């Protein structure tokens, strides 16, 4: 049995703006979270990951922080926060905060002072650079390098007052901190300790693998048809990233008790790199969020360029990560978060087979080796949204992409809207569907973004009273992880690796074995399990179809999941 408590834990992400609105202003808040703690208890989760609630201008919905030690009034007060923290702890649930320290808001006092003068003591807290040699500030191509922003356009913003540019890998209102400066690191570690001393139980670290840049900031390669260069080779897993994360561990977590959880969001990280980041002997992070499986349906043109991802693609990706971190390190397991479209629409069937495909996908995820993460509404089978036009979107990434694709590149607006409907982050950010009442029971006011119209039939009130609902099945999966050590700590071996429909694997620990068979398709699946004889008479543990087979018989119904046990 592992001594790591988070091996058997399940984490639930709350995006507070869209979770529940208690005061009727149309924006979710901390009191809304407090009002729904019983939902979390009934679900059975162990940890809440709370997306940013800090003071912010909300250019990127709170991921642009203007004060790390203040609660944004849109979400409430410190009294509300303390009540939430106490309420979670009283229910045996830990609270992990979102840590956003690759960048701040341009309204953070650090940046305001940094921008006040070239001679400011905080000038070197951010990445300021003069125009290219021989170029005039403000002219096209005069930026210090050719990097593009993740949110479209250049990664550099001109400050007319000084004639210099500052780096922003995301929004122009999210200037990147310069982690080469030890004073920056000191300030970040002091802030982290301050939150831990208040009682929080760890951090989810936003794009933490981008904090170390190659100091010379060289140009990146420009792909065919691209407007800007790819800077990722010079800031993804940069030259000092392991040094910085180990220093963070030593300055913040070393010497404290073992209740804390650290997970780093790391777009582009490889298995070999993740093994280093999560090797306990190195003292860096407990686990990382990798992006490989959620990039499978992205074409050569990036996230807006859709390609179909097959079951074989998913198995190959998950299998690589399971094998790669089997002996050293640990996986975080997720389908959804605030940046991803809804999985039941993406890899499942959000029509007639919504309930079956949602539970099948959940089975695949939750019974692998790693810590599962549930994003709010996932436990209800919430789906992508039928946005009618660009006016329905709120996400800065989506709006910037539309403006650039249509206004600069001349793309067909209908094609761009189709890509947004499929991939936009706003699919994850519509209100949690609590009931069939107005605005899905999210608010008595006008919601900041409209709910999915399907809330009249897909909502928590309906599902919590239905023993066959997606919600009920998630409860059963979570209970199985808590009850069976083999789910938390057993080895994993993929079987039927080349089957085009089935995602199948075994788990084993101390003589206890589980067989997980899942048909990830809308057609019946026939199979021949090489070890079928070993599972004759096996105990039926879990299944997602009330009338589905309860034994290895060579056939699974569409979207059927089956879990068997031997000891």
Image (spheres, rainbow, N blue to C red):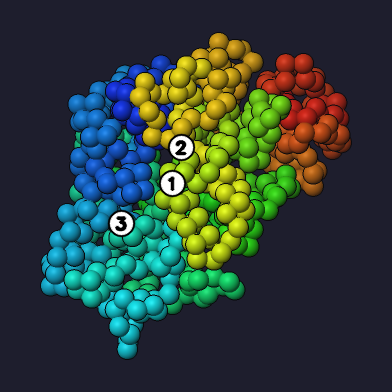
Precedes in sequence: disc 2 or disc 3: 3
The residue carrying mark 1 is: 395
| Residue 180 percent location from the top left of the image | 28, 67
- Give the secondary structure at mark 2: loop
Q: Are marks 2 and 3 in contact (CB under 8 Å)?
A: no
Q: CA distance from mark 2 to mark 3?
A: 21 Å
| Residue 295 percent location from the top left of the image | 59, 52
The residue carrying mark 3 is: 173
Residue 538 visible (yes or no) = yes
Category of crowding for the residue at label 1, using alpha-carbon neighbours closer than 10 angstroms: few (below 14), some (14–19), many (at least 20): some
Is residue 438 or residue 122 the one in the foreground? 438
| Residue 297 percent location from the top left of the image | 64, 51
The residue carrying mark 2 is: 429
| Residue 143 percent location from the top left of the image | 35, 76
The number of numbered badges drawn on the structure is 3
Q: Residue at x 64, y 30 (%)?
A: 358
């Amino acid at each position: 049995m592992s001594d790591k408590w988070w091996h058997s834990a399940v984490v639930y992400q709350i995006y507070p703006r869209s979770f529940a609105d208690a005061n009727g202003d149309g924006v979710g808040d901390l009191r809304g979270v407090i009002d729904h703690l019983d939902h979390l208890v009934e679900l059975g989760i162990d940890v809440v990951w709370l997306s940013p609630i800090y003071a912010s201008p909300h250019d990127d919905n709170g991921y642009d922080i203007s004060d790390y030690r203040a609660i944004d009034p849109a979400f409430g007060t410190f009294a509300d926060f303390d009540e939430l923290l106490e309420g979670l702890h009283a229910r045996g649930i830990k609270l992990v905060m979102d840590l956003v320290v690759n960048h701040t808001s341009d309204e953070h006092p650090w940046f305001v002072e940094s921008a006040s003068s070239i001679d400011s003591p905080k000038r070197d807290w951010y990445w300021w650079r003069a125009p290219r040699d021989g170029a005039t500030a403000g002219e096209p191509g005069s930026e210090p390098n050719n990097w593009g922003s993740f949110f479209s356009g250049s990664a550099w913003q001109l400050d007319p007052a000084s004639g210099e540019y500052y780096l922003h890998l995301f929004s122009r209102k999210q200037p990147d901190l310069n982690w080469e400066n030890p004073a920056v690191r000191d300030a970040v570690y002091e802030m982290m300790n301050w939150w831990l001393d208040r009682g929080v139980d760890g951090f989810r670290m936003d794009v933490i693998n981008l904090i170390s840049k190659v100091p010379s900031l060289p140009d990146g390669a420009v792909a065919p048809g691209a407007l800007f260069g790819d800077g990722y080779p010079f800031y993804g897993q940069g030259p000092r990233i392991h040094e910085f994360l180990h220093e963070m561990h030593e300055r913040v977590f070393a010497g404290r008790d073992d209740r804390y959880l650290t997970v780093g969001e790391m777009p582009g990280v490889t298995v070999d790199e993740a093994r280093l980041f999560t090797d306990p002997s190195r003292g860096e992070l407990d686990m990382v969020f990798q992006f490989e499986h959620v990039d499978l349906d992205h074409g050569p043109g990036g996230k807006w360029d859709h390609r179909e991802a097959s079951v074989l693609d998913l198995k190959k990706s998950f299998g690589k990560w399971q094998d790669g971190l089997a002996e050293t390190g640990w996986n975080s397991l997720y389908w959804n978060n605030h940046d991803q479209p809804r999985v039941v629409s993406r890899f499942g069937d959000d029509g007639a087979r919504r309930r079956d495909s949602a539970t099948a996908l959940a089975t695949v995820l939750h019974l692998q080796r790693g810590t599962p993460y549930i994003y709010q509404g996932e436990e209800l089978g919430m789906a992508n949204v039928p946005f009618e036009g660009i006016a329905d979107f709120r996400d800065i990434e989506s709006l910037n992409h539309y403006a650039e694709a249509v206004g600069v590149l001349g793309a067909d607006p209908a094609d761009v809207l189709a890509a947004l409907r499929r991939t936009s982050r706003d699919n994850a950010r519509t209100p949690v569907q609590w009931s069939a009442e107005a605005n899905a029971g999210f608010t008595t006011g006008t919601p900041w973004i409209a709910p999915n119209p399907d809330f009249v039939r897909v909502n928590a009130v309906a599902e919590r009273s239905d023993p066959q609902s997606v919600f009920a099945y998630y409860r059963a999966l979570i209970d199985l992880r808590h009850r069976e050590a083999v789910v938390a700590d057993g080895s994993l071996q993929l079987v039927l690796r080349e089957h085009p429909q089935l995602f199948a694997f075994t788990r084993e620990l101390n003589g206890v074995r589980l067989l997980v068979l899942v048909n990830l398709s809308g057609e019946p699946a026939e199979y021949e399990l090489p070890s079928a004889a070993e599972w004759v008479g096996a105990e039926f543990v879990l299944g997602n179809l009330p009338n589905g087979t309860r034994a290895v018989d060579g056939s699974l119904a569409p979207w059927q999941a089956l879990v068997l046990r031997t000891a």
